[in-house]
Amino acid sequence: MKENMERDVIIACDFKSAEDTFRFLDLFRDEARKPFLKIGMELYYAEGPSIVREIKRRGHRIFLDLKLHDIPNTVKKAMAVLSHLDVDMCNVHAAGTIEMMKAAREGLTREDGTRPLLIAVTQLTSTSEERMQRELLIGASINDTIVKYAQNAREAGLDGVVCSPLEAGMVHEACGRDFLTVTPGVRFADGEVADQVRVTTPARAREIGSDFIVVGRPITAAADPVAAYRRCVAEFVG
Ligand code: C5P
């Protein structure tokens, strides 16, 4: 798994169809650096596993972001199905408990002992501390919740967590430098925030110690997506 762990930018391919996705990916045809891509619920539910195989065939690394959250047995079986898709990274919600995360890891592990990286969502980057406390009745601070969920994920044998780049430093402090932080909620200093709450720039994400930034609309909705991607790489990877 080690070769997949170098700091990188992951583009969130939040498109509604294969056609839109390939139109977007064709823009990167001459790019020396083949972007690492995230396939989320919208695209996966629209196109199914074939979109994963097709993008993989084009040589991209893939983070399959389906955020599984169910009883342990169901998650284990679903992960066993996903393990055959040959993605590089996939995820669950840490809120599903340590038992569920362990079941996910077992299900994802292939017969030969290999598996994709497995990470857990702590708190969505669109969730504010106020909403978490008022609506979810979680009385702790959002930072304490994130650190605790990250520790649970590490205890379950996962490789890292999804959190805001603002939280990457404290997660590493609590769980070690090798424990991955995959961080959406990234915006250019001069860009739109939209529905995200806990955001920062690619350069700041690097300073705080994020391992992978997940960037959607700042690249996909840019007038020049390739230029926006290069700007992210320049700021984050160097
Ligand atoms: O367009 P934007 O850059 O906000 O996209 C962020 C991506 O990261 C989306 O695909 C979203 O589903 C995902 N994500 C997130 N917060 C999390 C986990 C995943 O924004 N905690």
Image (spheres, rainbow, N blue to C red):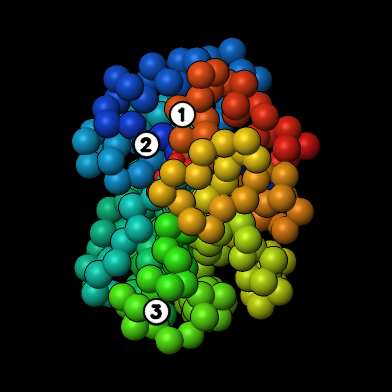
| Residue 86 as seen in the image, left or right of residue 222 | left
The residue sitting at the top extreme is 30
Q: Are marks 3 and 1 in contact (CB under 8 Å)?
A: no
Residue annotated with mark 1: 220
Residue annotated with mark 3: 133
Rendered image quadrant of residue 94: bottom left
Q: Are marks 1 and 2 in contact (CB under 8 Å)?
A: yes
Identify which amino acid the numbered label 2 is placed on.
Asp
Residue 108 visible? no
N-term-proximal mark, 3 vs 2: 2
Residue 26's spot in the image, x, y percent?
A: 46, 15
The residue sitting at the bottom extreme is 139
| Residue 144 as seen in the image, left or right of residue 55 | right
Task: Using the image as rendered, state which of residue 179 and residue 121 is in the foreground.
Answer: 121
Identify which amino acid the numbered label 1 is placed on.
Thr
Residue annotated with mark 2: 14
Residue 111's spot in the image, x, y percent?
A: 39, 59
